[in-house]
Image (spheres, rainbow, N blue to C red):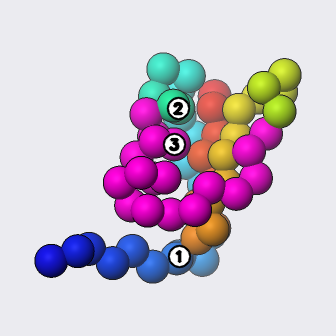
Amino acid sequence: MTPNFAPGDNIAIKLPSHQFADSVTFYRDVTGLEEVGVSSPVTHKTSGFDSAINIYEL
């Protein structure tokens, strides 16, 4: 049985630097959500997904 993930209203996740890459990988590869809106590497890291999930590096 394949899990089905549906979008929420708006979820913001703020993570320490050492957890950022693993969290983005989880939401992209494990849940299968499409990654949209990746920030510039010069600024603080942020990554958005098509389900209104935004991940921010602290």
Tell me what residue is drawn at x 26 percent, y 74 percent. Answer: 3
Measure the C-alpha gap from mark 1 to mark 3. Answer: 17 Å
Instruction: Give yes or no for residue 24 being in the magenta stretch.
Output: yes
- Count of labels shown? 3
Number of residues whose C-alpha sits closer than 10 Å to that of mark 1, classed few (under 14), some (14–19) or many (20 or more):
few
Measure the C-alpha gap from mark 1 to mark 2. Answer: 20 Å
Instruction: Give yes or no for residue 37 being in the magenta stretch.
Output: yes
Q: Secondary structure at mark 3?
A: helix
Residue 1 vertical position relative to residue 54 in the rendered view, above or below:
below
> Looking at the image, which is closer to me, 8 or 21?
21
- Residue named by callout 3: 24
Q: Which residues are magenta?
A: 22-39
Pick whichever of labels 1 and 2 is earlier in the sequence.
Answer: 1
Residue 23 vertical position relative to residue 6 in the rendered view, above or below:
above
Asked which quadrant contains residue 11, the reply is: bottom right
Q: Secondary structure at mark 1?
A: loop
**Mark 2–mark 3 contact, CB under 8 Å?**
yes
Number of residues whose C-alpha sits closer than 10 Å to that of mark 2, classed few (under 14), some (14–19) or many (20 or more):
many
Number of residues whose C-alpha sits closer than 10 Å to that of mark 3, classed few (under 14), some (14–19) or many (20 or more):
some
Asked which quadrant contains residue 58, the reply is: top right
- Residue named by callout 2: 20
In this picture, residue 2 sits left or right of residue 22: left
